[in-house]
Image: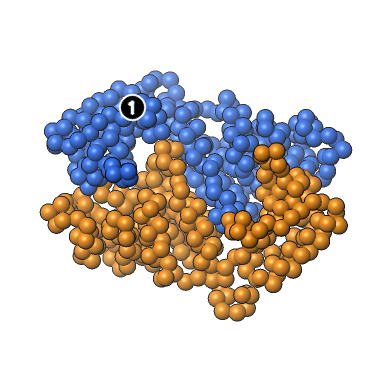
Chain colours: A orange, B blue
Amino acid sequence: MTEDTAQTQIVTAAVLVIGDEILSGRTKDKNIGTIADHLTAIGIRLREVRIVPDQEEEIVAALNAVRARYDYVFTTGGIGPTHDDITADAVAKAFGATIDVNERAVNMLLERIPRADLTPARLRMARIPAGADLVENSVSKAPGFFIGNVIVMAGVPRIMEAMLAAVTPRLRTGPKLISLTIDAQIREGDIAPVLAATQNAFPDVQMGSYPYDGDGKFGSLLVLRTASEDRLGVAAAALRTALTQAGLPWSDVAQEAAAKS
Amino acid sequence: MTEDTAQTQIVTAAVLVIGDEILSGRTKDKNIGTIADHLTAIGIRLREVRIVPDQEEEIVAALNAVRARYDYVFTTGGIGPTHDDITADAVAKAFGATIDVNERAVNMLLERIPRADLTPARLRMARIPAGADLVENSVSKAPGFFIGNVIVMAGVPRIMEAMLAAVTPRLRTGPKLISLTIDAQIREGDIAPVLAATQNAFPDVQMGSYPYDGDGKFGSLLVLRTASEDRLGVAAAALRTALTQAGLPWSDVAQEAAAKS
C-alpha cells in the first residue's frame, strides 16, 4: 500500500506506564515492547513513552501532555483493588469527568466473583469515569476503559494483552510501517558513510543501524522502514548496490528473522 | 539510617531513552530496569522515564523538561558512528553548547582503533559538547559524557552498564529506599482493607500490593518502602499483626528473595 491510497493518514500514539514498582526496579516492564510490536503491526506509530509514579498529580500532568499531542494514549497499571491503584481517579480528573461504580463493570466482575465477595475494595475495580466505554478483560474480568482518546489497561502483562486485543477493533489505524533488514558483516564505523549517502538519497525511507557483537560474530543490522513497499524495495536495492560497490560484505536477512525488525 | 542523619537530602533522577527501534518494538529495552535497580541501590530515586524517537527537536524538548526537574538525567542510545546517532548534537543544542571532536575522546578511541581506521564516521563518536566530562567505556572505549546534570550513555546494554559503573563514583546520592516484602496468600481484593488501614497509620512508609497468579498459587506481595530501617520494622510489625487479626494467611519473604522488591 502506498501513502496515497486508503488509510493515508498517519495515526500516532503514546504509552503511559504508571507504577512505582517499575521506577524502583522491582518490576521489569514487559508491556512497552508488547504494545510497540502490536501498534507497529496494526498501523499505529508509537511516538513516545512515559513512566510515572503512582501519584495523582504526576499521572494527570503526563496524561494531559500526551493526550493533547497524539491520536491515542495507552496507559498500563494502577487499576486494581488496593489503595495504591489510583489510575481511574487520575484519568477522571485529567478529563474533568466524574467517577463512580459502573453497573456494567460490576456485571463483568460478577461473571467471576460471587456477589457476596464483591467487597468495597473489589468494587473499586468497577469505578469508571463518566463517558468511558469499557474494555473487556477475558482473563480476570475486571475491565479497562476507553475515554476520549485514552485507553486504560491493567499492568499485569497477561491482562494487558487481553485488553489490547479487545480494544484493537475500535482503533483507527493508518499506513503500516514496513521494514527490511540487511545484515552488513562489518562494524558500524565502516558502514556509516555508505548508509548516510543512501539515507540522503531516500529521505522518505527511515534508515537505522544496529550493531551486534557476540559469539565471535560482529556486524551491523541495517533496517529500512517506510509505509511504501515500492520505496522500500527501491531503497534496499540502492543500498545493496552501494555496499557491493564499496566492497563491503552483506546479506539479506530472511523474512522470518526480519519480522522483529 | 534515618532521614535526619547524614545524606538526608533526597536525590532524584529521570531516564531518557532515545531510539526509534524501541518505539517500533524492534528492540526491547533492557536498560530502564538495569538503571532503576542501580539507582535504587545507591540512593537515587528514579522518578520518571521517557522514550523518544531519534529526532533532534524531540530529544531537546524532553531533555530540557526533565533536566530542569530532577537532580540527574541518564540518557541511553544514539551515540554511535552512524547518521542516526544524533544524541550528542541534540544534548549540545539543549545546553546551548558548542560541539566538536574532543582530543581526550579521540585518545580513548585510539586505545582500540588504529589511527588509520579513525574515519570521519568513527570520529563522530568523539564529538563531545564543550564543558562535558567524559564517561569511560571499558567495553568498546568510545566514551559517554556528563554535562551539567545529564549523563549520556550508549544504548547497547553491556556498554551502558560499563558507563553507569564508571560514572557512579561521581554521583551525589541520598538516603536509600529500603524495602521489605510480605507474602499474603490471598487475592488483592481481600487484603485491600487491611493494607489501606495500615498505610493510613504509616503515611511515611510507601506500601504497594503486587498480585501473583501462576503454577496453582496466587496471592499478593505486599511491599513496604522507606528510607528508615526503624520505621520499616515498625510498619511491617503492624501489618503482620493486622493480617493475623483479620485471619489472613501471610509469610515473610526471605531477604534474598526480597532483594528485588
Q: Which residue is mark 1?
A: B254
At label 1, the amino acid type is: Ala
Residue B59 visible somewhere in the drawing = no
Residue B51, placed above or below residue B256:
below
Residue B17 visible from this viewpoint? yes
Q: Residues within 10 Å of mark 1 (few under 14, many from 20)?
A: few
> Is A52 placed left or right of A47 in the picture?
left
Q: Position of residue A188 (x, y in %)?
A: 74, 46
Name the residue: 38% across, 34% down: B261
Furthest-bottom residue in this view: A5
Q: Quadrant of the N terminus of chain A?
A: bottom right
The percent coordinates of residue B255 (x first, y second) are 36, 26
**Closer-to-camera residue (A51/B132):** A51
Left or right of residue B6, residue A206 in this image: right
Give whichever of B95, A135 is nearer the camera.
Answer: A135
Image height of A257 relative to B244, above or below:
below
Please name the residue shown 83% across and 43% down the image. B119
- Output the chain of dot 1: B
**Residue A199 percent coordinates (x, y):** 75, 60
The part of the image, by quadrant, that contains residue B217 is top left
Give the structural element (helix, strand or loop) at label 1: loop
Observer-nearest of A50 and B131: A50
Tell me the quarter of the picture where residue B5 sits. top left
Q: Quadrant of the C terminus of chain A?
A: bottom right
Q: Residue at x 77, y 60 (%)?
A: A239
- The residue lying at 36 percent from left, 55 percent from top is A159
- Is residue B261 toward the left or the right of residue B104 in the image? left
Q: Name the one closer to the observer, B72 or B193.
A: B193
Can you give x and y, in whole percent of width and height, for residue A60 in the image? 39, 54
